[in-house]
Image (spheres, rainbow, N blue to C red):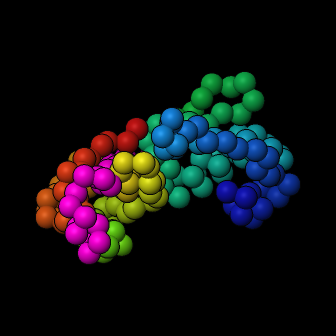
Amino acid sequence: MQEALDAQAPGSRVTDGGTLLSPEREVQSCDFDIELDGDPDTGLRLVIDTLDALGAPRGSKATVDDRPWIPFGNNEGVGLYLNGTDLPDEIYATSDVNELIEQLHARLGDEGSMQSWWQGPRETALYLYGPSASRMRELIHDVVATHPLAQQSRLVDLT
């Protein structure tokens, strides 16, 4: 974000930010504050356009000062939660999560990508984002159904 501000709104800067975590330390939401130099409407449009280009999820929102929130974001998310404790030890010993991720990316093509991941005490989540959660589910169905690390996994729509 700062790079876009430096290029298109010199003098503007990211001043603060934070992340809300669940009790298991999974990210629930993120926010950040920006000090805009110049016209606030132009600066807000730059912020929203930049975040949309970076893949902001639907349900994102922005505001300037005390104005009403403006919704933005074009992507939907699907979390693939891999069981990290209940599969046979051999599966964990002989399987590579990076190979699973490569298969997911190959299936998704231009319809989505993994944007992040989280490792908790009992499961690991792979966060996939793209224009359509239902389309991503269709595309990765066979990988999830057949990959050893995806046994006993769950798919969750991210909002």
Give x and y (percent) for residue 124: 38, 54
- The residue positioned 51% from the left and 35% from the top of the image is 23
Q: Is residue 78 magenta?
A: yes
Q: Is residue 8 left or right of residue 139?
A: right
- Residue 103's spot in the image, x, y percent? 26, 71
Whether residue 66 is situated above or below residue 62 in the rendered picture = above
Examine the image and state in which quarter residue 69 appears.
Answer: top right
Q: Is residue 32 left or right of residue 133?
A: right
* Residue in front for this viewpoint, 91 or 63: 91
- State the image coordinates of residue 18 (x, y, percent, origin top left): 67, 42
Q: Residue at x 20, y 51 (%)?
A: 152
Please report the residue visible at 57 percent of the width from the left and 52 percent of the height from the top.
51
Q: Residue 27, position in %: x, y?
A: 51, 44
* Residue closer to the observer: 96 or 35: 96
Region in magenta = 72-95
Q: Is residue 145 left or right of residue 97?
A: left
The residue closer to the viewer here, 21 or 8, is 21
In magenta segment, residue 42:
no
- Give the quarter of the figure containing the C terminus: top left
- In this rendering, does residue 109 appear at all? no
Residue shown at the point (66%, 51%) measured from the top left: 46
Q: How many marks?
A: 0
Q: Vertically, is 6 above or below 41?
A: below
Q: Can residue 125 be seen in the rendering of this structure?
A: yes
Q: Quadrant of residue 40?
A: top right
The quadrant in which the N terminus is found is bottom right
